[in-house]
Structure formats: structure tokens, C-alpha cells
Image: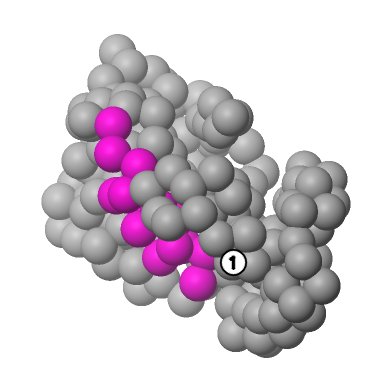
Amino acid sequence: MVARIVYPLFGAAIAAALGLASMPAWAGYDEGLTARQRGDFAGAIKEWTAAAEAGDARAQFGLGAMYRNGEGVPPDPAVAANWYRKAALQGFAQAQYSLGALYQNGVGVAKDDAVAASWYSEAARQGHAQAQYSLAVMYQIGAGVKADLVEAFAWLSLAALQGQTGAAAALGRVAIQLTPEQQTAAERKGEDYGERFKAKP
């Protein structure tokens, strides 16, 4: 059974995702982040809305998270999904993962495991460890994708390598279901994925 996705409040992990140095500078984004960090949610919403409407993927994701968690606004998962989608389409991995979670759980959007798996895959290929784990579980149980224990093992290997909580235990449960031939293939694929899809430092 797929574990329920937990949507975190803003903390160090989300702040890090929002502060990626590789993203271009946009007027209002930094001001919004500062406002959010001091608890001025209304100020953050104002600044990030302007930046998001101008195309800043970080601000789009930040707004999505604030609407999802009800920070400074009533919780509105449909609005959250809209902002996540805008950021996801720009390649923002955390937004891709978060949008996938909404589709998997049918929150703010119609439940669609195939769409969820697609967004998880996009984020997983950018090195997002939680997306790698979530995608692996979907391959393990055949939700939204054809069941494939070799594929599940490969993604779990990478998620575990990157320290995702729960991946190591899940990896063991998948491993005991593999034939020797599948085990060999899964290990090779895991090594390949480790080289191609590990998070960049």
C-alpha cells in the first residue's frame, strides 16, 4: 500500500530548495523569502505573487507550498496545484515531486497515478531522492506504471544512496522477490541510475 504523502511546512529543506543559486534573480523573490522567514506570510504572499506571475519558478513553488499548507491564506490545494504546475513545467524538481504527490493522493486535482508517476519520474531524474523513492514504490505495486521490480530496485538503490528514509528497508523487501537474473539486472541498472540521476552537489 502506498504511504500517504506528508506535505511539510517550510523548513530548512524547503528553504534550500527555494534558494537554489542556479536560478535567475527576480525582483521580489528575495524579499518574499525574507518575509516568510520572519513569519510575515502576507508579505511573502504579496512579493512571491508578483515574482511568480513574472515567471520565477522558486516563487511559484513557494506560493504553492503556502497555499497547500495554509500559511497566510486558507489552505487551497487546487491553487497550490496550479502554482506547482507552473514551476514544474520550468523543471523545478521540488515542484515536480509535490505536484506528483497531489495527483497520487487526489488532493486539489483528480487522482491519477499515471500522471503522478510521470511527475515523480521528472523529479527523480533530476536527483530528487523522495521522488525516486515514490516512483520506486509505484513500480513495486504497479500504480500508474506497469509493475517492474527491477525498476523499483534501481530507483530504491539510488534513493537509499542519497539517504532517503525508508528506502533501504524497502530495497530489502524488493530484493527478496527477485530471481538471480533479475537481481543482476537490477544491480546493473541501479549503478547506471546512480551515475546518471544522483543529485548534483
Q: Position of residue 168 (x, y in %)?
A: 83, 52
Q: From the image, tell me which residue sits under label 1.
A: 151
Residue 112 covered by magenta stretch: yes
Q: Is residue 67 left or right of residue 186?
A: left
Query: Mark 1 is on which residue type?
Result: Glu
The mark tally for this picture is: 1
- Farthest residue toward the top? 74
Say few, some or many: other residues with alpha carbon within 10 Å of mark 1 (under 14 / 14 to 19 / 20 or more): many
Q: Measuring from the top left, give residue 107's x and y in whole percent.
A: 32, 25
Name the residue nearer the viewer: 193 or 185.
185
In this rendering, does residue 4 appear at all?
yes
Query: What secondary structure is the stretch in magenta mostly built from?
Result: helix
The answer, for residue 29, to whether it is visible in the render is no
- Residue 50 versus residue 87: which sits nearer the camera? 87
- Give left or right: position of 73 versus 151: left
Q: Say whether residue 129 is magenta.
A: no
Q: Quadrant of the N terminus?
A: top right
Q: The C terminus lies in which quarter of the figure?
A: bottom right
Q: SS for tag 1?
A: helix
Residue 41: where, in percent of width, then height? 40, 25
Q: Residue at x 55, y 60 (%)?
A: 148
Comparing 28 with 109, the one in front is 109
Q: How is the image coloured?
A: one colour
Query: Quadrant of residue 76 in the image?
Result: top left
Q: Nearer the viewer, residue 38 or 124?
A: 124
Q: Taking 55 as reference, is 194 above or below it?
A: below
Magenta span of residues: 111-125
Q: Give the residue drawn at x 48%, y 42%.
A: 34
- Residue drawn 48% across the image and 47% down it: 142
Left or right, 88 with respect to 191, comes to left
